[in-house]
Amino acid sequence: MPRTAEQQREYMRNYRANKARKAAESAVESTTESAGASVTNIGSTRARTAKASKPAAAKNSTTPDSPKPEGIEESVAAEIKAMPHAANQPGKVAIMLGLARILDNPHAIPQHTPAAKALDEMMTKLRGAEVAGGNKLTQLRSRREGKSA
């Protein structure tokens, strides 16, 4: 026999409450088992990102001189630090680091392609601004100085 509208509403309330309780319990469990994973907050979602697999971790532990594997966020941050022009645009830098965090999140697979595209475009623009010497007004001034000289 199908449920009435009131029964369906009650069922959905209970379902959502149980789902939220289970998510909270799993979040607590994932923070307590921090031996091989880290919990990261990205926007309003909690994503559990696993570090290196056990064989790779064993290989890295035997060779302490080997470089530590980096995520995309660390790589982007290092690349941005190398750009002196990035200090003038802290908003863009924050957006690029947020996009890199999305790319590091294994639970955000559907968002990886647009995030990668947006990150690439922003990095290209930032590099172009650095090479060109700033914004369009600066470029126009440099062209005028070149013609008058």
Image (tube, grey):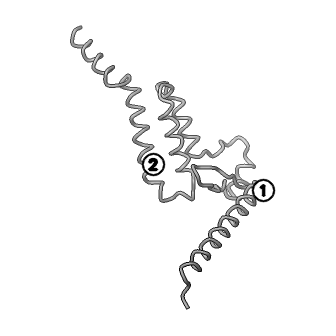
The residue at the point 70 percent across, 61 percent down is: 24
Q: Position of residue 36 (x, y in %)?
A: 72, 55
Outermost residue toward the bottom in this view:
1
Q: Amino acid at mark 2?
A: Ala
Q: Which residue is mark 1?
A: 32
The quadrant holding residue 52 is bottom right
Outermost residue toward the front in this view:
6
Outermost residue toward the left in this view:
147
CA–CA distance in space, label 1 to label 2:
32 Å
The quadrant holding residue 21 is bottom right
Upstream in sequence: badge 1 or badge 2:
1
Q: Which residue is mark 2?
A: 116
Q: Position of residue 88 (x, y in %)?
A: 48, 25
The residue at the point 53 percent across, 43 percent down is: 98
On screen, 66 above or below 90?
below
Q: Position of residue 29 (x, y in %)?
A: 75, 60
Within 10 angstroms of label 2, few (less than 14), some, or many (20 or more) residues?
some
The residue at the point 26 percent across, 17 percent down is: 143
The residue at the point 63 percent across, 46 percent down is: 69
The quadrant holding residue 70 is top right
Within 10 angstroms of label 1, few (less than 14), some, or many (20 or more) residues?
few
**128 left or right of 71 in image:** left
On screen, 59 above or below 121?
below
